[in-house]
Amino acid sequence: MPVKRVVGVIAGVAALVAGLVGPEGVAAGSDRPGHWGPPQRPLEWKQCPPETKSASGGLLGFGSARPLWPARRGDRREPVQECAELRVPLDYHEPYGQQITLALNRIKGTVSRDGNHLGALLVNPGGPGGEGLSLARYVATRLPKDVAARFDVVGFAPRGVAPSQPAMSCVDPARFYAAPRPDNVPKNDAEEQVLVGRARQYAEGCGNRWAWFLPYLTTENSARDMDAVRAALGEEKISYLGYSYGTYLGAVYATLFPQRVRRLVLDSVVDPDGVWYQANIAQDHSFDRRHRDFLAWVAEHDDVYKLGATQAAVSFAWYSMRSRLRDRPAGGVVGPSELDDVFSNGAYSDRLWPYLGAAFSSYVRNGDPSVLVKLFHVEAEIDAEEENSYAVYLGVECRDAAWPRSWDRWRADTRRAHAQAPFMAWPNAVYNAPCAFWPEKGGTPVKVGTSHLPSVLLIQAERDAATPYEGAARMRRLFPTARLLTSGGGNHGVSLAGNACVDRQLAAYLRDAALLPQRRGKRGADATCPGAPEPRAALMKVVAGAPGTASHVSAVRR
């Protein structure tokens, strides 16, 4: 589901600035203290292996795995990290049975434990399918120094996600995702059956390779893995910062183990009552709304992009471009489905809007596909790490909860949503369609919510596409000790992304458990921060010979 990735779309921009410049588990609530399984040896922390490109969490989805946050030049230290592996039970009903391996990293705080040290801060970027190690490094460098000093920031790759082992893969991405793919929006029954066939093929690939693993790939088991991490760290309590799908994982952990929570921050909050089919239907509408925000922004900057001075005119140009790409893919690779993948990233972060606007304008006005093709390769091309993330995404969501098994139901719901929200209804349905044919039936989700928690901080953008605002308001009601901080705009992943107001509240909470006053104002929020300013419009052009790349994009007009 688009709870896409949150370590993010703006490695997208970082890459654009550098590379383009300018069983169902143990029953819910059956909390047994400690670790379930053979006695654990102390974690052996070692030098981390050389970094590789981190998985990005798929095209859509609840929590991005590529960071959504911009890098700043020259103002952040490189963290000193160490890595370890932890063996955990595949099946917590059989704790002495088969084991799997979780990959961990840690950036240690500098305050001594007999001082004001606050223990471990576990982090998760979303997905499902985000690996978390990159996020730990990011969080450790972006927190205020005095706050980072008091925590050991710990990242982990959830079960199934590389570099944890086993790491799922269900198809050969080079073959299965060869561009251009079939159009996600079928024009007739024959085209629809092609899409259904691909979904069935992917589900069968996962079943053929991972039948032994799929029954245990659930959010609940990942939450129990988190508690195994806590125990292996020797901590009585942990703190947690989760983005996007990571908010659901954190909410499940807090429900199962409330006495193990010291601090809990949930940023860009999943609706726990929508898991997972209904949440995707809700996303169809919120993604369409955010895409219209982008089109309106392009219209406001008609002096730069020259695609029309009204949202309606720019919308006509966008859908005309999409239609043309069915017959004439840009650069031979960007068809309508690839276009959807590229532009859906703009719903996660408006920092991409100048690049998307430039690609849009260059193609429509000048017939130049170069910026669009470059954006596809940087932002949306599916490689082995992307496919690993997508496999885990499906594995978790298809198993967590029941999905309709009748394609007639999917078709009817998607056509109804498409009539109102054409930008994402069919692409989102196609993205999740393997769940209609998944070899493991969906289970019963944990009933999220408890009053037995210390203070909880929820953070939410008002026009978030991947995790609509209503989910945060509902989570606020399910955790009575929570306070909801909202921000303007629609960027997914609000904290540690440059919003000083939000970051002050986050730092105060992590430092001293300082809690917002309970006000329950507009739409259930306890406090509101302004959103970041909208990005500046710019045209781009591809310039050959950027350092380390074949080409880059630079601004040619503001």
Image (cartoon, helix red, strand yellow):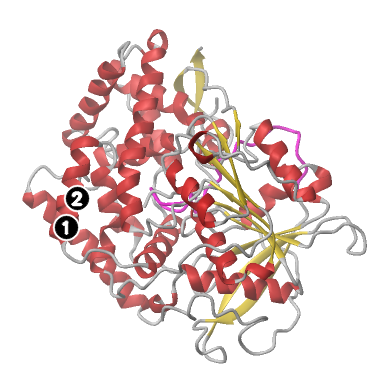
Asked if residue 48 is positioned above or below residue 421 in the image, the reply reads below
Q: Residue furthest left?
A: 189
The residue at the point 36 percent across, 73 percent down is: 443
Q: Which residue is mark 2?
A: 413
On the rendered structure, is 90 left or right of 58? right
Residue 539 in the image: x percent, y percent?
A: 45, 17
On the rendered structure, is 179 left or right of 136? left
Secondary structure of the residue carrying numbered label 2: helix
Is residue 57 covered in magenta?
Answer: yes
Q: Nearer the viewer, residue 517 or 446?
A: 517
Q: Do we see residue 374 in this rendering?
A: yes
Q: Amino acid at mark 1?
A: Arg
The magenta stretch is: 55-78
Q: Amino acid at mark 2?
A: Asp
Asked if residue 14 is positioned above or below residue 33 in the image, the reply reads above
Name the disc covering residue 409, or none.
1
Is residue 473 covered in magenta?
Answer: no
